[in-house]
Structure formats: structure tokens, C-alpha cells
Image (cartoon, coloured by chain):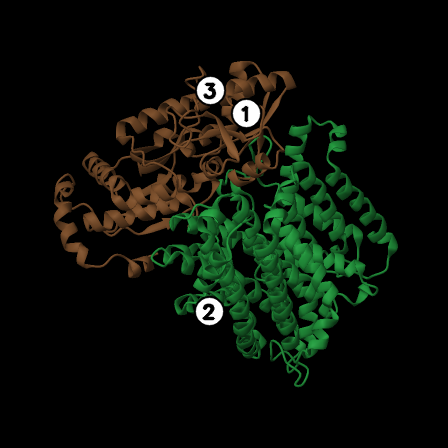
Chain colours: A green, B brown
Amino acid sequence: MLDLTTIIAGIGDAFTLTNLIYILLGVMLGQIVGAIPGLSILMALAIAIPLTYSLDTLTAISFLISINKGGTVGGAVPSILLNTPGTPESAATALDGYPMAKKGQGGKAMKYSLYYSVFGDISSDIVLITVSVPLAAVALKMGPIEITALMILAFTVISGLVGASLIKGLMSVALGFLLASVGIDPALGSARFTFGYIELLDGMPLAAMAVGMLAVTEIFLRFSEFATAPRGSNLDRAQSFEPGEQSVTFKEVWANRFVALRAFAIGTVIGAIPGLGSTTAGFLSYSISKQAAKDPESFGTGDPRGIAASEAANSAVVGANLIPLLTLGIPGNIAAALLVSAFIIHGVQPGPLLFERQGQLIYGLFGAMLVANFANLLVGQFGMRFWSMVVSAPARVVYSGALLLCVTGMYFAGGGVFGLVIMLGSAVVGYIMRLTGFSTIAFIVAFVLTPQLERSINQTILLSDGDPMELLQHPIAIVLLLASVCAVYFLGPWKKKDPGVAGA
Amino acid sequence: MHMKQIFGPPLAMAGALLAASAASAQECPEGYPSGPVEFVVAYAAGGGTDAIARTLAAEIEESQGWTVPVSNKPGAGGGVMMTGLLGAKPDGLTVGVGSTNTVTLDPYANQGMPFTWESFDYPATAMSVTFGLVALEDAPYDTLEEFIEYAREKGKATISTSAMALEIAVERIGEHYGVNLVPIPGNGASDALQSALGGHVDATIQGSQHIQQIEAGKMKQLSTLVEERVSYAPDTKTTFESGVNVTAGAYVLVVLPKGVDPAIQSCLETVFAEAIESDAYNTLMENLDAVPANLGKDKTLEFIKKQAAEYQDAFAKRGN
């Protein structure tokens, strides 16, 4: 274990003026990029890495991690105010955030989102700082067989998102399965459904599909409203704010402490297992909270618990994702992999020796992460006013501007014309789905989860020679599979206790 | 990204460097380059190959006084960049930076690839990826031979991998010994490493992430899958030494479209060779736990030709 002086010296390093400025800059950049649909945080990180070559190692890493943290807060803004999530992980926030904004409580929804997001972030950072080593050891026990069981559980739990009609929901999920199978077959290595386009060998690009299906679809729906609205109807502002209904008291935040705690726990566990991610965490947490609630029908109508469940979970992933990276040297997702290259370029080798060799740097990073959380809170407070002003502009301008940003952002960040075609194609499909009552959310969640499920099923079959008795040696997998059976039994449509979140 | 230059080295150095560049500049034909020489990286910004390309670009800008912008065309394991290069003007102003696997393996793995290894010229390689077969420190085998014995007794052994080339290597080693070695394809090197660290597979093949694990005493190298032994596991035999004619070597590769003026090609060969020997590049290699490896034009072609034939053969046997 490290001695206290290293820890204190490390944390002290985080508090130099340069570091604080870069943390603040990183958080601002992250929140802005996160809030613009079409721009992704990964893109921002990739562009920022070469900019940090000449910086001091700690400053560089703090800057990058601040961008990542800012992004999770910023991503909720367009979901709440315009129902146009810029990333799939903030899509669950839109389910309750947007209805709340429609009631004129956009500011309140943004505050809830900010507070729960920062709560999830700080808590998972504390877990990272204190118990990352044992947690990483547990996460390593999650092999292909356990991950397969976990993905099956995830699919059963998110059944709460399929919408009013089970059949239509399942059809959306099936479409998600189908499109997720485009690309290289993980078992054989041969190309599937690529029709000769080598760009499709990597599969359908998630960012382009998610922005198209979630954000651009919403924009199209608005455009059709503008076109058919009678003259003089109330379409002048994108979002209006009822005066006196925007504040959030501590009591209101405290009321949802259990939902937020559970969301943080889900986000931390999902984050600590390499390969899963914040989208999975956000939706899992939302579904579980909804189905565990006494009054699930109030979810989807502007319930702060929905915001808490989604935001605390997807933000908790950011800190937890560093657990496998710092303790084992395994990056848990693409953002963590980008941090690895930043570490390496600065001559720091992530791996099991990291704490021993670079203890002071790592505690400096921990200090910077905690500072970044407070910077997030501060910048978020100012940001809210700014975004409120933006969406007070005429709706026609706001939604047209959002479309312009989606298109230009996707062109630059998502592989040019190819990304654009996928985005607009998904938007058209999403538009038809929404008009006919198919859930685009169920589609996206299935699309996100399927590649991991397919890959781990393939690994499981190879490891076990297809012998089901092999399962007996994997108690964690058995527990997860039993939980899936319970989930189907207790949460299935035959309980018929809620109208669902149709077409969300 | 030109922004990097804002933070770049002080201008004062430029004068001294201009003088130093004279030697290699004479190798380049008059009037070349007539504009910026663009490096197109086959992988996303922020990764290892990207860092290599950017470091070389900065070095060449300094020593030659050229303008070298770097862009990224990721996708299809480097295939998107290579396909773009097919249509590029062969004026020596577009230079690809990718991996040998993209030209030696991918055209045989996927019928749809519009190129083969013969579609390009290769003035240099920049780095060798030294793949190793590694297992947990407490595994009951220390060498390839003992591992094979273990597999024979148990009926099979599983090895997590992160690329088609490595799956083929696993299958070929198994074939050589007549034992059942099963490659478990993971979602990238990290995923494969995680399966091995968690004890879910018997071993893994890794290109770089295992080095830190070996240093920390968590893993041991059973066999080295390139021609020569590696410095981080000097006592581990190579596959050749074990009598197995299987390697999984790969290089970071410099690629030119076919048809570039031979004079420009030899100019670029010299310029890259100098940049790869530079201090800045060697520092980067140290940080990456790697060694610079430039085969030069002829040997690169020889390597690619040989490996492509091996993979073509392997895929013909697999029947896909």
C-alpha cells in the first residue's frame, strides 16, 4: 500500500492553478460538446489527445477526464429540452426529462439531471479511490459465460421499455438484432450483410444510427407539426419555462435517494466490468427503477425518479470504468482506451504496476477527478441558464439549428457522407416507427446490447463445447439466469400494471 | 490537427535542423514535394499507430521543412484507408500509415476487399508488433511444449485472441502438434487479456499489453511468436526455436499508391528511415514498450509477399 505522504502529495498536485484551469476548460468543453447532438465525446477526446502532448502528464490526463465528465452532464441537456438525445446513453434521461420540460419545468429537470449526475459521478469516484482493487478482482470473475447470462438478464429487464404493445416492442427489438448483425461475424470472421461496402465491415455505426433514430426523428416530427399547425397556434418557442417552477429544493432531491443510490450501484458495477457501457447502465437502471416502483405508470410522465435513475447510473460509469484500467491495465471502454494512449504518450504504462510506480500521479488524477465533479456542478449551473436562453428562441429556429448541427457534426465526426447517409436513413426509419407506434428506444437498446451478447455466446460455446453442464461450474451465471427468469415472471406483460412508454 | 504545432518545439531549433536536412534532401527529386505531404492513418486518432504517424510527421516537418498534415481514416481494420489510397494520385503527396495485416490477410479473409498486397508500394515499416503466447503466472505450464502436453491431456486448450491473424496462428500451432487448440475471439486485445487474467481461458496471444503484466509477475510468456526473442522475456523460446514454422509478426506499415515516381519513392524511403532513427521517435517507442523496426523497401515487400502467401494458404484450408 502507498504511504500517506504520496497520497497527500499526489492530491496536492491536482490543485495547481494550471491544473484547475485545464479541469475547468475540459468540463466546459465536455458540456458543450455533449450538449450538441451530432458531436460525440469520443471525438472530442480523440481530437484533444494530440493537443495535450506538450502538457505535463497530470494536467493532460486531468484535462481529458474532465472532458469525459463534462460530456455526461452536457448530454442530458438536449434530451431534456428538445427530446433529441445526442448520445444513446442520455436517451433514458429524455423519457422523463422531456415530459417535465413540456410541463414548463425544463429548468427543474436540468437541475435534477445535474445533481444526480454529479452524485453518481462523485460516488463512483469514491468507490474507485477506495475499493477499486477488490472490485476489479470480482469483475475479473465475469467471464464469457457470466457475461452471456448478464446480457440475457439485461434483455429481460429492459422489456419494460418495449412500449404499449408487446408485439410491436418485440418487432423493434428484432430489427435492432438484425441491424446489429451487419459487419464481421465474430465466430467465422466473414462479412455479413455488408453488400460490398467495406465501411460496413465494422458494423452499422452506432453514433450515426442513434443520433438519426433518436434526435433527427424527433426533429422530423417537429417539422411535420410546423407544417400542419394552424396559423397562430402555440409553436413559437421551442420550450417555455413557467416562472417559479424551476427551483429544486434539497428535500426534493433527497426524496429520491434510494433510486439514485441503486442507480449509482448499477452504474458502478456495469462500469467496472470491461466491455459494457453507460448506455446499458442508464437503461438498466431506468427499467429496474420503473418496475420496482409502486406506481410505474408515473414514469414517462415527467417523474424525477426517471431522471435520477438514468443520470446517476450513466455518470457512475465514468469513474468505474477506470477501475479495470488502473488496477489491471485493461481499458473498460473506448473512452478509457483513449486515456490509455494519452498515458502511454506521456510515458506512463497502465498495468498492474501503475500504483506502485506512479502512485503520486494516480492520486493526483483522483484529486483532479473530484475537483472536476465540482467544476461540473459549477459550469452546469451557468450552462443551464445559457441553454434555457437557447431554447427560448422560436422552435422553428431551434429545431432547424439542431438539424444543421446533427448533419455537420456527423459529417465531420462520423466518417463523412457514409455517416450522413446512415443517420438520415435511420431518421426516416425512426420517423415511420414513431408514427406507427414502434419503440425506437427498444430498437436502440437491442442494437447496443446485441454485439456483446453475440460475442459472448460465441465464446461460451467455444469454451464449453456447447455442453450445458458446464454451467454448473459457474454459480454467478446461474444466479443471473435465475434472476432473468424471475424478471420475466414478475415484470412481464401479464402483470399489466403500466401503459409503458410507447414510442418514446 | 495543426493545433499541435502551437505547442511544438521552439522555432530556434529550426535553423540548425535545416542545415542537417541537406544530406537527405539531395536524394529527393527537384520540385518534390510540390505541396503538403499528407499522412493518412488507418486507425482512429488517439491510438498507437496514430501516435507513430504524428511523431514521424513532426520529425519530418522539422528535418525536411515539409508540411505534413495527419488525418485519420479508420474502419474495416485499416481497409478503409487502403481503399482510399487506391484512388489517390500517385504523386507522393498522399502517404498511408497502417498495418501489414491489412494487406497480407484481409484480402483473403473478405472477398469484398478491393485491393491485394500488390496494389501498393511500401517504402518502410516503423514498428514490429512482437506477439507472445502468455498465461497466468500460476498456470501449470511454463513453455509451449508443456502447454501442448497440458492440452493433450485435457483434450483441448483455449487461447483468447484479438485478430483473425492470431486465430490462424493458434490453429496452425495446434495442427503442427496435432492437439486441439481453440482460439476464443475477443473484442480487441484488452478483452482477450481480461479473459486470460480472469482464468476463463488457458492462455492468450498479446501484442503489447502483456509486457506490463509480465513485469508485475502476473503472467509468463510461454512462447514468442516472432522470428527473434524479445527483451522482456529473454529466456522464452520463439516458435521457430520450438520447431514450429508459425509466426504472427506484424509491422506498422508505410504505404504508397502504386505508380509513384521511383525517385520520389527512394526519397521517401530515406526520409522515413531517418525519421525512424530520430530521438523523438525512439522515445515514443520506449513509451510504447516497443522497438523501432524499419525493414526498408525490399525486405518489407519480401515479408509481405511471404506472409500473404501463408494466409492465402490458411484461408484456402479453412474454406472461407
Q: Quadrant of the C terminus of chain A?
A: bottom right
Is disc 1 in contact with disc 3, using a CB cutoff of under 8 Å? no
- Marks 1 and 3 on same chain: yes
Q: Could you say whether the residue bearing mark 2 is in a helix, strand or loop?
A: helix
Observer-nearest residue: A416 or A341?
A341
Circle 2 chain:
A
Instruction: Classify residue B31 as left or right of residue B107.
Output: left
Residue at the location (29% across, 33% down)?
Answer: B294
Alpha-carbon span between mark 3 and mark 2: 56 Å
Q: Which amino acid does label 1 sit on?
A: Asn
Instruction: Classify residue B108 as left or right of residue A499.
Output: left
Alpha-carbon span between mark 1 and mark 3: 11 Å
Q: Which amino acid does label 2 sit on?
A: Leu
In the image, residue A441 above or below residue A347: below
Is disc 2 in contact with disc 1, using a CB cutoff of under 8 Å? no
Which residue bears the numbered disc 2? A24
Q: Could you say whether the residue bearing mark 3 is in a helix, strand or loop?
A: helix
Tell me, for residue B313, which label it has, or none. Answer: 3
Residue B143, position in %: x, y?
Answer: 50, 21
Instruction: Classify residue A491 as left or right of residue A27.
Output: right
Please say whether residue A49 is visible from this viewpoint.
yes
Q: Which amino acid does label 3 sit on?
A: Asp
Circle 3 chain:
B
In the image, residue A495 above or below residue A218: above
Residue B33, position in %: x, y?
Answer: 20, 47
Residue A183, position in %: x, y?
Answer: 56, 40
Which residue bears the numbered disc 1? B320
- Marks 3 and 2 on same chain: no
Within 10 angstroms of label 3, few (less than 14), some, or many (20 or more) residues? few
Alpha-carbon span between mark 2 and mark 1: 53 Å
